[in-house]
Image (tube, rainbow, N blue to C red):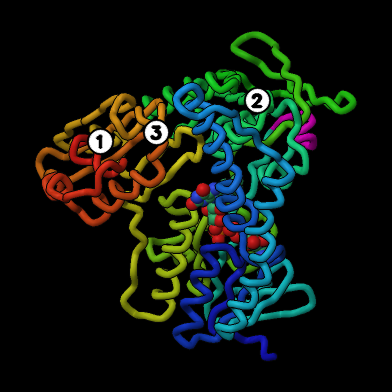
């Protein structure tokens, strides 16, 4: 095997895979390297395994809320069976991924990649070089300045638990904490979310977040705001989390303490300085073509790249395809992050796409806000679902949707229609004129506008 390639991709997650497969398809001699199992975070330790567990939690919620309304028996989660079912999705991934790379004539290597020159890397004993090297190394949990941080479990540990502990504490109130908290509460655990500031889920609409917090409390999740965790102590099989809540010292007792304090780009081990690659704590510094600003041989995509895109799988995949295009073509493409949706897979789900209310006002649009409580609409009331609410932000001058924010049992699918309208510039009048199948959640769209 020659060690010279057209493209070397570091990381086999969604972003790296997109670069590697589209580059190889165009005939470029391509290699991909991963230090862990092939496939990356999303299919192995993120989106997919989480969705298997979250969907089970949804089913529990559905049965609970229909009790006395035609459904008689409570459903319960059998954690071991659910985890086995989850493994049936995750375990085949690494092998299947590597086979698909090989089929596409992509060279596959295992090990930690580190730069040793401008366009040269080292993987174990091997030295490889390429005209273009793409960094797609993803993100990792942010280090938390807490005494006893070694007692924290990580999101990937939670997704591998053989037994669900009776009491689970999440440090940090981001989307991963809320999703896992809803799973654990529906599976019968006592759950606490400890949030440093006064607001959880900062990337989402505050009115929707208020409703989700209210529902979370109703299902037995304790949310502690303005509580800064200082220390985690182990006491036999129990953990004691000590925090400063406003001006008081408080303690929480649990059997598992999970890191929910955000993720940071995984750049530490890459020896970026050896290749003159600029970076900051928000990732590899790239221009609008996703090329390193300081080394023309290098691109970065996905969670590790310092871009305006959220750290989400579809964003990484989009960036991967763009980089492959930019490597091959003189006319370069820029990533477009306009209207990309994101979802919290709690129950009810919460979703957003486009501008927030504040952003729309700050950008001086002629804003119209359509904010409605839709809990008593037939879509939700016939399954005793709730709360459900939507906030659609429209530019009155152009009739285009600027932002959509929602909570409800259908929010994860519904948001895609609004994302489509935002991304493709479909005016409100056109969305309202579509004949939708009835009775479905989507058929509510005209009434939301
Ligand atoms: C719990 C959880 C739930 C999530 N849920 C969702 C969701 O519902 N929807 C969504 O869109 N996104 C979700 N995400 C985010 C999503 O998983 C990421 O945005 C996505 O995986 C990023 O893809 P990537 O290719 O940039 O990085 P990754 O998928 O993280 O892949 C990076 C790869 O690089 C490898 N690597 C790192 N350093 C090196 C090195 N030096 N040498 C060799 N290999 C290296 C790693 O081993 C890894 O395999 C979730 C994330 C988590 C943690």
Q: Is residue 330 left or right of residue 428?
A: right
Q: What stretch is highlighted in magenta?
A: 145-152
Q: Mark 2 points at which residue?
A: 191
Marks 3 & 2, CB-CB < 8 Å contact: no
Which quarter of the picture shows residue 222? top right
Q: Residue at x 69, y 19 (%)?
A: 243
Which corner quadrant holds the C terminus? top left
Q: Residue at x 34, y 64 (%)?
A: 334
Task: Give coordinates of residue 250: x percent, y percent.
Answer: 70, 13
Q: Which mark is residue 408?
A: 3
Lower position in the chain sequence, tag 1 or tag 3: 1
Ligand 1 is located in which of the four quadrants? bottom right
Lower position in the chain sequence, tag 3 or tag 2: 2
Q: Name the residue under label 1.
A: 392
Q: In this view, does 99 lie above or below 322?
A: below
Foreground tag (1 vs 3): 3
């Amino acid at each position: 095997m020659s060690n010279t390639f057209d493209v070397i991709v570091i990381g086999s997650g969604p972003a790296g895979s997109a670069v590697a497969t589209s580059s190889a398809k165009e005939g470029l001699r391509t290699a991909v390297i991963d230090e862990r199992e092939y496939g990356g975070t999303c299919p192995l330790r993120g989106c997919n395994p989480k969705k298997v567990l979250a969907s089970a939690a949804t089913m529990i919620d559905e049965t609970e809320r229909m009790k006395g309304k035609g459904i008689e028996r409570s459903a319960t989660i059998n954690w071991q069976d659910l985890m086995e079912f989850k493994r049936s999705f995750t375990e085949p991934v690494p092998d299947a991924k590597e086979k698909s790379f090989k089929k596409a004539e992509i060279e596959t290597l295992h090990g930690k990649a580190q730069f040793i020159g401008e366009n040269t890397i080292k993987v174990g004993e091997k030295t490889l070089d390429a005209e273009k090297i793409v960094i797609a190394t993803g993100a990792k949990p942010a280090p938390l300045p807490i005494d006893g941080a070694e007692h924290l479990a990580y999101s990937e540990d939670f997704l591998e638990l053989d037994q669900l502990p009776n009491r689970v504490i999440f440090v940090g109130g981001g989307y991963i904490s809320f999703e896992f908290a809803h799973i654990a509460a529906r599976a019968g655990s006592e759950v606490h979310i400890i949030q440093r500031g006064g607001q959880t889920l900062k990337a989402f609409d505050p009115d929707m977040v208020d409703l989700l917090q209210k529902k979370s409390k109703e299902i037995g999740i304790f949310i502690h705001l303005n509580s800064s965790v200082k220390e985690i102590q182990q006491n036999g099989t129990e953990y004691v989390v000590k925090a400063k809540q406003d001006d008081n010292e408080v303690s929480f007792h649990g059997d598992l303490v999970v890191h929910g304090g955000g993720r940071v780009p995984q750049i530490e081990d890459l020896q970026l300085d050896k290749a003159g690659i600029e970076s900051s704590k928000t990732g590899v510094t790239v221009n609008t073509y996703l090329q390193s600003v300081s080394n023309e041989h290098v691109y970065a995509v996905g969670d590790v790249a310092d871009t305006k895109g959220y750290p989400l799988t579809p964003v990484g995949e989009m960036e991967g395809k763009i980089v492959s295009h930019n490597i091959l073509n003189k006319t370069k493409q820029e990533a477009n992050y306009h209207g990309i949706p994101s979802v919290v897979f709690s129950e009810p789900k919460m979703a957003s796409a486009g501008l927030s209310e504040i952003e729309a006002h700050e950008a001086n649009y002629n804003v119209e806000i359509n904010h409605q409580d839709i809990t008593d609409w037939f879509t939700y009331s016939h399954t005793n679902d709730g709360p459900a609410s939507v906030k659609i932000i429209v530019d009155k001058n152009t009739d285009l949707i600027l932002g959509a924010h929602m909570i409800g049992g259908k929010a994860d699918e519904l948001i895609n229609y609004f994302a489509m309208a935002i991304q493709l510039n479909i005016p409100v009048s056109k969305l309202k004129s579509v004949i939708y199948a009835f009775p479905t959640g989507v058929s509510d769209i005209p009434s939301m506008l």
